[in-house]
Image (spheres, rainbow, N blue to C red):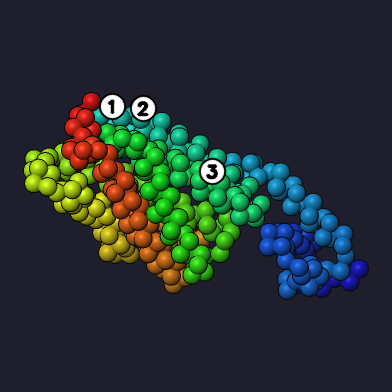
Amino acid sequence: MAVVNVCGQDPRKLLEWTAVIARARHEHKARVPLERSGFLVPVSREKERVARMILEVLARNAFEEFAAGMLKPVAALAIVGMAIALSLVQRLQLEQEMVTSIARAFVQLALIGFILQFIFEQKNAVWIFVAYTFMVIVAGYTAGRRARHVPRSPYIAGISIFIGTGVTLALLLLLRVFPLTPRYMIPVSGMMVGNSMTVTGVAMKNLRDNLKMQMNQVETALALGATPSQAIKRPMKRTLILALSPVLDNTKTVGLISLPGAMTGLIMGGASPLEAVRLQMVVMNMLVGAATFSSLVAAYLSWQYFFTKTMQVETKVFLDE
C-alpha cells in the first residue's frame, strides 16, 4: 500500500490524522474522498473504515468526554462557595437559594447541551421551529409571571415575543444574514427570545403600575370624552421608554464596559476579533429590533384589559392581591 503521510512515519500520527479527516467529512457531509485530503493521502479503504470505527466509539463516549470536561466548571464552584460564605456571615439567608440555583443551572445547561448536539446532527429545519416554539412558550410564561396582575399575561407575553422575534428572524433570513440551519438559528433566536422576555415582562408590569399611579388623570380624560387609547397615551409612552432604556443603554456602551456574550464566545473559541465584532454588530441590531417589536405588541395588547366595554377603567385589574 502506497501512502504519502505528511505526519511522518509515526503510525499513531497517521491514525490520528485519518480520524480527524473522517470527522470533518462526517460533520460537513463533504463529497471529497479521504484520498484527496490536503493533510493525508491514504489509498486504502481500510484506513477509512478504522477511522470511522474510532468516530463511532467517540460518539458513544460523548457522555464520558463531557464528564471529563466538567473539571473546570466544578473547580469554578469555589467562587460560589465564597458567595455562600459571605451570605452566612451577613446572615442573608440566601445559601439554599444559591445552591439550588447553581444546581439547576448545571442540570439545565447539561441537558440543553445534549439536546442541541442531537438537533445539530439532524440538520433539519423542522427542529428550528420546535426549539423556537419551546423557547417562546417558556419565555411567555416567565414574562407573564412578572406581570401577573395583568389579565392573561402569559398569553399576551407569548404572542408578543413570538411576533417580535418572528419578524426579526424573518428579516434576517430575507436579508441572508444567517443561513436556515439549526446551528445558527437556534442560538440567534435564543438570544432574541431571552432579551424580549425581559423587556416584555417589564413593559406589561410598568404599564399597569403607571396607569394605577395616574388613575385620576386617566379617569378625568375619559370623563371629558377621550377614548381609552387617547387617555392611556402618556402612560404608554412612559412605559415603553422605561422598558427599552436598558437595551439601548447596553447598545450605547457595548465594547466599552464589557464584551458581549456572543463576541466573547467567538474570541475564546479562536475566532478573529474583527470577525467577532462583525457578528456582534448583527446581534445588537437584532436585539434592539426584537425588543422594540415585542414591547410595543405587549403594551398594546395589555391596555385593552384595563378598560371595560363602556370605556371606563377596569378597577379590579388594579387591586393588589
Horizontal arrangement in the rendering, residue 13 relative to residue 127 (left or right): right
Q: How many marks?
A: 3
Q: Which residue is mark 2?
A: 96
**Which of the two discs, 3 and 1, labels the residue nearer the N terminus?**
1
- Is label 3 in a helix, a strand or a loop? helix
- Is label 2 in a helix, a strand or a loop? helix
Alpha carbons under labels 3 and 1: distance apart: 30 Å
Query: Where on the picture, by quarter, is residue 244?
Result: bottom left
- State if disc 2 and disc 1 touch (CB < 8 Å): yes
Q: Position of residue 51 (x, y in %)?
A: 78, 57
Residue at the image position 38 percent from the left and 38 percent from the top: 154
**Three-letter code for the amino acid on which mark 1 is drawn:** Gln
**Which of the two discs, 2 and 3, labels the residue nearer the N terminus?**
2
Q: Which residue is mark 3?
A: 112
Horizontal arrangement in the rendering, residue 211 relative to residue 185 (left or right): left
Residue at the image position 11 percent from the left and 41 percent from the top: 219
Query: Where on the picture, by quarter, is residue 23?
Result: bottom right
Question: What crowding class fits label 1: few (fewer than 14 Cα within 10 Å), some (14-19), or many (20 or more)?
Answer: few
Q: Position of residue 26 (x, y in %)?
A: 72, 59
Q: Can you say whether 298 is above or below 268 in the image?
A: above
- State if disc 1 and disc 3 touch (CB < 8 Å): no
Question: What crowding class fits label 2: few (fewer than 14 Cα within 10 Å), some (14-19), or many (20 or more)?
Answer: few
Q: Position of residue 119 (x, y in %)?
A: 61, 49
Residue at the image position 46 percent from the left and 64 percent from the top: 171
Q: Position of residue 289 (x, y in %)?
A: 36, 60
